[in-house]
Image (cartoon, rainbow, N blue to C red):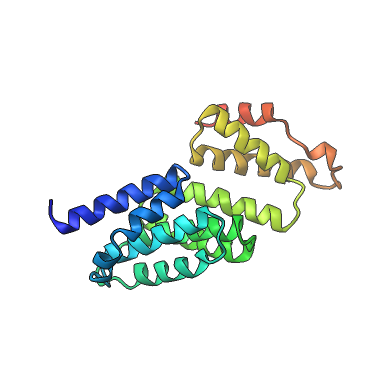
Amino acid sequence: MNEETRIQRVLDFARDEIVRLNPYRALEYLRSITSEVDDRQGTPISAEYQLLLADAYAAQGDPGAEAYFEEALHRACNLSDRDAALEMRAHDDFAKFLASVEHRRSAARLHNESAKNLAIKLGRSEDAARLQLRILKLDLESDDDVRLSNFQQLRKAGKELGSSYQRQLAAWFQYSGEHQEGSRGRVAARNADRASIQYFRHLLSSIT
């Protein structure tokens, strides 16, 4: 096994540990290849390594992860051969950290938008829909929108049915159109605007 392959395997192991919510083990893997990565500045391996460091610290709820994400983005965006997929991941993961740990919705929204635009360029429609749903949630939260509880019902129904993100997004747009039409000419009472999970189950099942 050559050196590059060995390093990539360690990076894969670290990523798996982060997915398993074991960031401490992930950091052990990453620290074992620090010197090798330092010899590969300006490469995708260096950017991937930095992003995984950021993800591991973010998984611990460490505010210091922000600096690691910023450096990961810098490395990913300045590769001699652009890696749009890695850039998308960096924006995506940074957005999650900013929203869930730092509670900075505006900053998180910007990174979600960047990730979504990259997903569209890459032809990743499902990722683009997933990111748009995340943006919608941030907007609803920021506006203290009465529809937030309905959005949560949609997401719950989508999870139960195993619906794709694209189907969930289409269902939300359809619901929003119906909601707007139904509310036209009146001030809807908060309780009257609540949609049941059964409504969203039916709506998701009806979309082709």
Can the viewer see residue 84 in this picture? no
Total numbered circles: 0
Q: Looking at the image, can residue 151 be seen?
A: yes
Which residue shows up at 63% across the image and 50% down it?
Answer: 137
Which image quadrant is residue 78 in? bottom left
**Residue 155 image offset from top left, x and y in percent:** 60, 38
Near-viewer residue (32 or 132): 32
**Quadrant of residue 106 within the rendered picture:** bottom right
Q: In the rendered image of this protein, does residue 160 appear above or below residue 1?
A: above
Residue at horizontal 70%, vertical 54%?
A: 141
Q: Residue at x 38, y 64 (%)?
A: 50
Q: Is residue 164 left or right of residue 182?
A: left
Residue nearer the viewer, 130 or 193: 130
Relative to the observer, which residue lies in front, 182 or 136? 136
Residue 83, how many percent across, how many down? 30, 62
Q: Position of residue 76 (x, y in %)?
A: 35, 67
- Image vertical order of residue 200 relative to residue 169, above or below: above
Left or right: where does residue 208 sit relative to residue 47? right
**Residue name at image x 58 percent, y 54 percent:** 135
Q: Is residue 71 above or below residue 108?
A: below
Residue 84 coordinates in the image, percent (x, y): 34, 61
